[in-house]
Amino acid sequence: MDATALRALQAPIKERYKADPAAAMITLKATGTLDDTSIACKVETGRALAVAGLHPATGGTGLELCSGDMLLEALVACAGVTLKAVATALAIPLNSGSVAAEGDLDFRGTLGVAKDAPVGFAEIRLTFTVDTDAPQEQLDQLLKLTERYCVVYQTIRNGPPVQVRLDRA
């Protein structure tokens, strides 16, 4: 897909959202079922069933997915798609590219071993590697707009309010 095709695809969508801002508000959902035989949660991904469990650093077997890894994978996926879309829209040629995310966790926090240890990532690093002949100013713009429009990055970066509740079955 080139910039012209992307603009043609998105133009009617953008016009609709300008005319009716409420139409742009969509609630994405994820659901999971607690496993009744192990410490795991079966998450419906829309494509397959993902089974998340404890990370080996907290006593898990390593056979189930780690939710921390899943968070980084979601960041990589969103950032990669966003970078590709922005590059396409700006007609920045990318011969190839990759995206990597890594995050530092102190598992003492989630295990309650040390009250001063944070629960969650202390730092996340997101790295893009691209093969392109584009000038540096275009690459700077590409990175700036990718950060601006990546949903997962912005959600992690800005921490929206999260409501949590526990209901009885």
Image: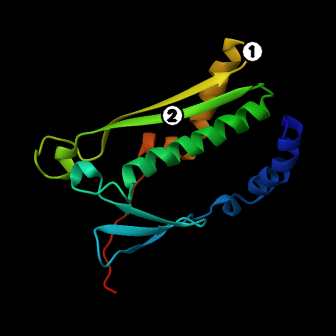
Figure coloring:
rainbow
- Residue under circle 2? 100
Q: What residue sits 56% from the left and 33% below the top?
A: 99
Q: Amino acid at mark 2?
A: Ala
Residue 114: x and y in percent read 10, 44
**Residue 47's spot in the image, x, y percent?**
61, 65
Q: Position of residue 65 (x, y in %)?
A: 40, 56
Quarter that holds the C terminus: bottom left
SS class, disc 2:
strand
Q: Quadrant of the N terminus?
A: top right
Asked where in the image residue 64 lies, by quadrant, the reply is: bottom left
- Three-letter code for the amino acid on which mark 1 is drawn: Asp
Badge 1 local density, few (<14 within 10 Å), some, or many (20+)? Answer: few
Quadrant assignment, res 124: top left
Q: Could you tell me which residue is drawn at 49 percent across and 46 percent down?
A: 73
Q: Earlier in the sequence, mark 2 or mark 1?
A: 2
Q: Are marks 2 and 1 in contact (CB under 8 Å)?
A: no
Name the disc covering residue 133, or none: 1
Q: Secondary structure at mark 1?
A: loop
Using the image, determine if residue 89 lies above or below residue 37.
above
The count of marks equals 2
Instruction: Say above or below: 58 vs 166.
Output: above
* In the displayed structure image, the side of residue 100 where residue 14 appears, left or right: right
